[in-house]
Amino acid sequence: MTMNKHIGTSFDDFLAEDGLLEEATAIAVKRVIAWQIEQAMQATGTNKSTLAKRMQTSRTVVDRMLDATDTGLTLDTMTRAASALGFRVKVELIDG
């Protein structure tokens, strides 16, 4: 009988062993950010085109920002979006 090397470890340990933890974390963070921006858009009655105009950017940039799998979001884009919606960004590092 073979022993499963992952039994007794956390899912984070499993992802780290396979070299996927950083990518999975980045996608999870991006999903939260995209969701929060979508919620702010709904709360303020702002559509994508209006947000793009307020940010002085293209609708394509807004679409990429709201794409939960595109982890290339910059702090500049995120803060411009938040500001355009009447919010601000808070970034925090936590003990790993």
Image (cartoon, rainbow, N blue to C red):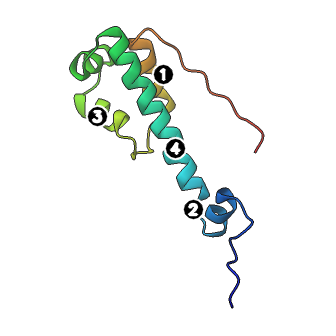
The residue labelled by disc 4 is: 28
Tag of residue 13: none
Tag of residue 63: 3
The quadrant of the picture occupied by the N terminus is: bottom right
Q: Earlier in the sequence, mark 4 or mark 1?
A: 4
Rendered position, 4 above or below 80:
below
**Residue 53 position by quadrant:** top left
Task: Give the Cα distance between marks 1 and 3.
Answer: 16 Å
Task: Give the Cα distance between marks 4 and 2.
Answer: 12 Å
Q: Residue at x 53, y 46 (%)?
A: 26
Task: Give the Cα distance between marks 4 and 1.
Answer: 19 Å
The residue labelled by disc 2 is: 20
Q: Residue at x 40, y 21 (%)?
A: 39
**Residue 22 position by quadrant:** bottom right
Instruction: Determine contact: label 2, label 3, CB under 8 Å.
Output: no
Give the residue type at disc 2. Leu
Tag of residue 79: 1
Number of other residues with Cα within 10 Å of mark 3, as a class: few under 14, some 14 to 19, many 20 or more: some
Q: Single out the residue that lies furthest toward the right.
A: 95
| Drawn side of residue 67 relative to residue 72, left or right | left
